[in-house]
Amino acid sequence: MREKPVITIDGPAGAGKSTISRLLAERLSYLYLDTGALYRAVAYHLIQKDYSGNNEELADLCRNIRVELNDRAGRLHVFVNSEDVTMKIRTEEIGLLASRISAIPMVREVLLSVQRDMAAAGGVVAEGRDMGTVVFPDAEIKFFLDATVRERAGRRYRELSERGEKASLRDVESDILIRDRQDRERSVAPLVAAADAVHIDSTDQTISQVVDIMMGVINKTGNAQMRTEKCP
Ligand code: DC
């Protein structure tokens, strides 16, 4: 029995999961578990090792990879075999490769225990694609965050522009569509809402509106649990 709940937030690329999960974790003083960063870290490692697509080579790489998320001065840093890759994994190229390799069961298996270990004591906001369905099916509170493709592409485009990266809105939208298809149609742990998830469409909502909606759900769940506990 966990002391504090696990809160899961699943949804497609660009739905606002990262920002919202981080803010929610801050408000609750919970750990923010960015599982996309783990898949990105593996993708980064495969590029570094000139991975050719060969299965045996992948098995060997997976056996020898150690992926960790560690808190550094209040910010989550991602490490691959002790190398800090936090900034290096935030490219569109790595995002697309992460989406591709995340369909490989061996890769998902390597990362499963990393994720579960980090959330063992609860008090975690876990963000990804299969949090509420596969990794934490017993999570106390589950959300599925979505937005239209146009809105998600617009957000990603603005994010890249702010970072000074060149990209056309059309290319960003097409990358989002490819990722949606890869993430939703894979046979292992596809992106799908858990049956007991609360759906939120963030298309016309600000970040703080979505956080407020989630806090409302979390508080209501807490009250409901307290009421049940008081019943004889
Ligand atoms: O959330 P993100 O864009 O950083 O994730 C990168 C890719 O990693 C995403 O397209 C699919 C994969 N992923 C996954 O398969 N399962 C997760 N729980 C998180 C991410």
Image (cartoon, rainbow, N blue to C red):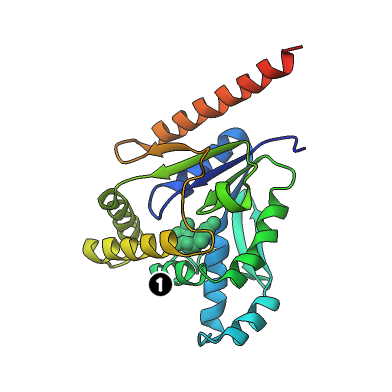
Quadrant where the N terminus sits is top right
From the viewer's side, name the closer residue of 95 and 131.
Answer: 131
Residue 225 placement: quadrant: top right
Q: Which residue occupies 51% across, 80% down?
A: 47
Q: Amino acid at mark 1?
A: Glu
Side of 98 relative to 55 (left or right): left
Quarter-wise, where is residue 105 in the image? bottom right
Q: Position of residue 42 (x, y in %)?
A: 57, 71
Direction from residue 150 to residue 130 in the image, left or right: right
- Residue at 73% x, 47% y is 120
Percent of width and height locating residue 131: 57, 50
- Is 147 left, or right, of 219 in this rendering? left
Rendered position, 163 above or below 140: below
Q: What is the count of numbered marks?
A: 1
Query: What's the residue at 53%, 37% (across, down)?
Result: 196
Relative image position of residue 162 (x, y in whole percent): 33, 56
Which is more toward the observer, 17 or 195? 195
Relative height, residue 47 to residue 86 (above, below): below
Q: Sort mark 1 into few (<14), some (14-19) or many (20+) by Cα contacts within 10 Å.
A: few
The answer to whether any part of residue 171 appears in the image is yes
Q: Is residue 64 visible?
A: no
Write down the quadrant of residue 8 in the picture.
Answer: top right
As helix, strand or loop, the secondary structure at mark 1 comes to: helix
Say whether residue 114 is left or right of residue 163.
Answer: right
Q: Would the CB of label 1 be found within 8 Å of ligand 1?
A: no
Q: Quadrant of the C terminus?
A: top right
Q: Who is closer to the viewer here, 213 or 228? A: 228
Q: What residue did someone put label 1 on?
A: 93
Residue 231: image location, x then y, percent: 72, 13
